[in-house]
Amino acid sequence: QVQLVESGGGLVQAGGSLRLSCAASGGSFSSYIMGWFRQAPGKERELVARLAWNDGSTYYVNSEKGRFTISRDNAKNTVYLQMNSLKPVDTAVYYCAAKRSYGASWDVWGQGTQVTVSS
């Protein structure tokens, strides 16, 4: 059974940085699309960044590009989300997800990790 486990969340002051990790196990993710999502209370879950495992190509949503960086470590089967210049509006539960192709649905999800940014 494929599994994703997030870690690295916590409490940080505005302007600070965090690096989230998503450890993948239980199968081969070499052809998968990986994504970081977030969901704040009362809001819809939204895509933050996306990465194709096979070639490392990335995609960022709106203004998050420049503050957030998605990357991978093939040896560790881990995807990261580096978050810099954090703002209180970034406060949310952050989820790692995976799908087999760009056209597929996101069908593998981690448990989420809480990120809280104080002002």
Image: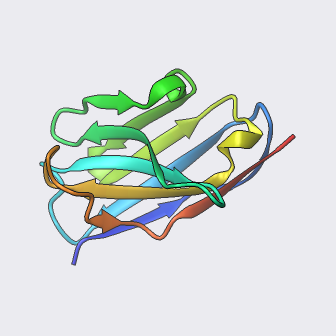
Residue sitting at x 15%, y 40%: 54
In this rendering, would 84 be left or right of 65? Answer: right
In this rendering, would 4 be left or right of 56? Answer: right
Vertical arrangement, residue 73 with respect to residue 77, above or below: above
In this rendering, would 54 be left or right of 24? Answer: left
Residue 119 coordinates in the image, percent (x, y): 87, 40
Residue sitting at x 41%, y 67%: 110
Residue 8 seen in the figure: no
Residue 49 coordinates in the image, percent (x, y): 41, 38
Q: Quadrant of residue 3?
A: bottom left
Vertical arrangement, residue 58 with respect to residue 35, above or below: above
What residue occupies the far top of the structure in this picture? 66
Q: Quadrant of residue 42?
A: bottom right
Residue nearer the viewer, 111 or 61 = 61
Coloring applied to the structure: rainbow
Residue nearer the viewer, 44 or 68 = 44
Q: Quadrant of residue 108?
A: bottom left
